[in-house]
Image (tube, rainbow, N blue to C red):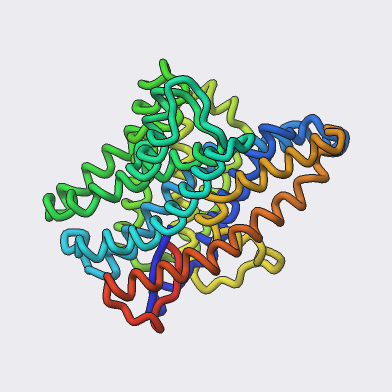
Amino acid sequence: MDAVTNDHAMRRNTGIDLLRGLSILLVVLHHIGLRMPLRKTALLDVFPRTLLSALNFNGYEAVFIFFVISGFLIAGNALRRSGSLSNIDLRAFYARRFSRIAPCLVLLVAVLSLLHLAGAADYTIDRAGQSLPRAIVAALGFHLNWYEGMTGYLPGNWDVLWSLSIEEVFYLGFPIVCLLTRRSWILVPMLVLLALSLPWTHAALAGNEIWQEKAYLPGMAAIATGVLGALIVQRWCSVSRGIAWALGMTGALGLYLVMFEGKLLWQTMHDGYMLVLTAAALCLVLASVWTTGVTPRRGLGWLRSWGRLSYEIYLTHMFVVYGTVRIFKAMGGDMSLGFLWYVPALALCWLLGHLVERYVSTPAERWLRARWVGTPTAMLAVAAE
């Protein structure tokens, strides 16, 4: 979810920002919907139940779209900087990851720790077998997903860190694997096998619902799909406009099937529906790259801004969700009017993410990268990894 750019080739891609914006929006709608489902509001009299359910209950799938995008962007930027994955600069790679991830993560963990110690409702870790010190170690040690799988769910603001654990463990090992394999004919088959393993690794963990949802290998399979996409783009810098649009339509159809026909996909493919999801996300990412220069439709700037702030919104949105739900209940909790609370909640999620990006993540990232990577501060501009 991070990148630093000083040339045109590494500037943000509008289509990818839109896809990320859609994904983070679905995550936020999911977490609001678990507490105020749209299908229980008066909107059910106006819109079909399938639409309302699709808006509320595709947050998990949206995270896998993030994984695909993450693999594509981080591998793509590594390829642009080094020319080959076998030439990755380990020190620079890890410095970029740390400078992007650590400032917001450490701040979040510090705030959540203080809220726990203060006994704040919705933020206190009180499940048997769990403790604040252990949660801190799990969050900063990138195994919070495993910790939850073994002990149960943590409070919501902690819980969102499960996906970060998967991403960062992948990126701790990824450059080392690239340097050890040295040859694309060795690395690519490994990535293909990992990407295609998704249905089996997901199904194999059915005995533990939390661990099945948050295990390392399924998420890493989605990230590997994105890495393969970056290698495809390096091999074919451009394709015909017809192929690009066909990929875009295929990707859109795949996402529609997952979001609106998920039950049908499950009945016919079971865990294989996850491959439809990651393949659709990859198609949309490739189409976005190969149609660069196409003017986006007006009125989507707000969704692009959600994509640009996706990391900050993801880490902080549960503060807004919990606050909104508490105020909603304090004012009577009329569920038929619950949909009215979505707009201010979404606006506040964006605003909080924007403030964190402006005053925490971007300044800290620029400062750290200027010192560790050697890029002049004036040339740093957060882009799209």
Q: Give the residue drawn at x 66%, y 32%.
A: 34
Q: Is residue 131 above or below residue 175?
A: above
Q: Give the residue drawn at x 50%, y 39%.
A: 158
Left/right of residue 296 with respect to residue 342 in the rendered view: left
Q: Is residue 384 above or below residue 177?
A: below
Identify the residue at the far front of this view: 118
Position of the N terminus by quadrant: bottom left
Left/right of residue 213 with respect to residue 354 in the rendered view: left
Task: Please tell me which residue lies in front, 206 or 48.
Answer: 206
Q: Position of residue 361 (x, y in %)?
A: 47, 64
Identify the residue at the far top of this view: 207
Q: Position of residue 312 (x, y in %)?
A: 53, 56
Q: Give the residue drawn at x 41%, y 62%.
A: 2
Q: Is residue 258 visible?
A: no
Task: Please tell me which residue lies in front, 122 or 67.
Answer: 122
Q: Give the residue drawn at x 72%, y 49%.
A: 345
- The quarter of the displayed image where residue 157 is located: top right
Q: How many marks?
A: 0
- The quarter of the displayed image where residue 119 is located: top right
Left/right of residue 308 with respect to residue 225 in the rendered view: right
Q: Is residue 62 above or below residue 363?
A: above
Q: Position of residue 162 (x, y in %)?
A: 44, 38
Left/right of residue 308 with respect to residue 168 in the rendered view: right
Q: Position of residue 8 (x, y in %)?
A: 41, 79
Q: Is residue 120 visible?
A: yes
Position of the C terminus by quadrant: bottom left
Task: Please tell me which residue lies in front, 266 or 246.
Answer: 266
